[in-house]
Image (cartoon, rainbow, N blue to C red):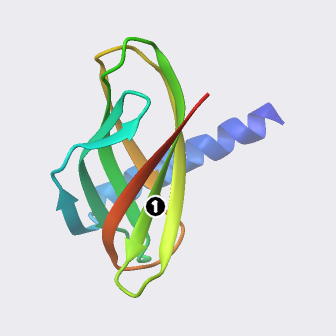
């Protein structure tokens, strides 16, 4: 079972690298704001691109401004121009105080993104 998960992860990374190299993404918008999501975490700036299938890819920096190491489930909700929304999540593991990390989230729904909203659940 573990080998299948590793193989799937490797294939995902190879596909991602291929899509980036072929420049199949188109910029949707950039949000320069720094968003306080609570628990000492801040997100931003954020850029949103759309892949060749129309699905949003959200890239942002997350900063731990707290005094504790943080493990968190991060969820981004992408709002579309026609009222449709999509969600994607990732796990931010052991983010030390006053450190930053780049995150990238893929939303599985084709839409024209116009805004993003962040939420955090501490683990």
Mark 1 closeness class: few <14, some 14–19, many ≥20 residues within 10 Å = some
Q: Residue at x 41, y 66 (%)?
A: 78
Specify the farthest residue to the left: 32
**Residue 53 in picture, x, y percent from top left:** 44, 76
Q: Quadrant of the C terminus?
A: top right
**Residue 25 in picture, x, y percent from top left:** 30, 67
Q: Residue at x 30, y 22 (%)?
A: 65
Between 83 and 108, the one lying in front of the other is 83
Horizontally, residue 75 falls left or right of residue 3, namely left
Between 8 and 86, the one lying in front of the other is 86
Specify the farthest residue to the right: 1
Q: Residue at x 52, y 61 (%)?
A: 87
Eyeballing the image, is 28 above or below 14? below
**Residue 24 in picture, x, y percent from top left:** 31, 68
Q: Quadrant of the N terminus?
A: top right
Horizontally, residue 106 falls left or right of residue 6, namely left
**Residue 26 in picture, x, y percent from top left:** 25, 70
Total numbered circles:
1
Between 70 and 29, the one lying in front of the other is 70
Callout 1: SS: strand
Residue on which disc 1 sits: 77
Quadrant of residue 115 in the image? bottom left
């Amino acid at each position: 079972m573990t080998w299948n998960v590793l193989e799937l992860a490797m294939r995902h990374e190879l596909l991602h690298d291929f899509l980036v190299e072929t420049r199949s993404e188109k910029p949707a918008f950039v949000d320069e704001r720094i968003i306080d999501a609570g628990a000492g975490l801040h997100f931003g700036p954020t850029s949103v691109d759309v892949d060749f299938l129309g699905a949003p890819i959200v890239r942002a920096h997350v900063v731990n401004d707290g005094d504790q190491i943080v493990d968190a489930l991060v969820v981004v909700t992408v709002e579309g121009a026609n009222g449709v929304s999509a969600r994607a999540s990732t796990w931010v593991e052991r983010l030390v105080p006053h450190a930053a990390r780049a995150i990238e989230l893929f939303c599985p729904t084709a839409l024209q993104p116009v805004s993003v909203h962040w939420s955090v659940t501490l683990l």
